Image (cartoon, rainbow, N blue to C red):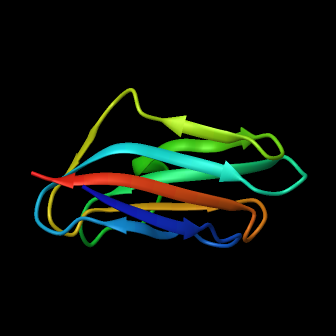
Amino acid sequence: MAINNTRLTGGAASSIYTSSNSSAITTLYLCNTTGATVTCNVYVVPSGGVASANNAIYVNHSIAAQVTYIIDSEKLILENGDTIQANCSAADSVTATISSIGI
């Protein structure tokens, strides 16, 4: 099992996890460490693709000040090179933590 921590950007979505070989995402935490509400976007992007409305799984998801949103009810199975990309409304306000396991 592996843990990846990344601060989200405020601009275009960027990769917060890249699968090497096949992997399963077991949990994704989005932790707002600021005193203001922010919105986040999360995308599951096939290898070589770009974040877009076609691969969005959360769009403008609101996270209140100093609250953590946990995504753990469904597991994502990724192939080699697939990415999870994300961004938020204010740079450096949200830490994304991903728990994954190779399969």
Q: In the picture provided, is 57 more to the left or to the right than 62?
A: left
Q: In the picture provided, is 89 more to the left or to the right than 8?
A: right
- Identify which residue, 44 or 91, lies in the foreground: 91
Quadrant of image for the N terminus: bottom left
Q: Is residue 10 above or below residue 99?
A: below
Residue located at (42% from left, 55% from top): 98
- Residue 80 position, x and y percent, is 15, 66
Q: In the picture provided, is 15 more to the left or to the right than 90?
A: left
- Identify which residue, 41 or 55, lies in the foreground: 41
Which image quadrant is residue 75 in? top left
Residue 86 shows up from this direction: yes
Which image quadrant is residue 59 in? top right
- Residue 40 position, x and y percent, is 65, 51
Q: In the picture provided, is 28 more to the left or to the right than 76?
A: right
- Identify which residue, 87 or 27, lies in the foreground: 27
Residue 13 shows up from this direction: no
Residue located at (50% from left, 66% from top): 5
Q: Is residue 16 above or below residue 100?
A: below
- Residue 33 position, x and y percent, is 76, 56
Furthest toward the right, the residue is 35
Which image quadrant is residue 46 in? bottom left
- Residue 73 position, x and y percent, is 39, 26
Q: Is residue 69 above or below residue 10?
A: above
Total numbered labels placed on residues in the image: 0
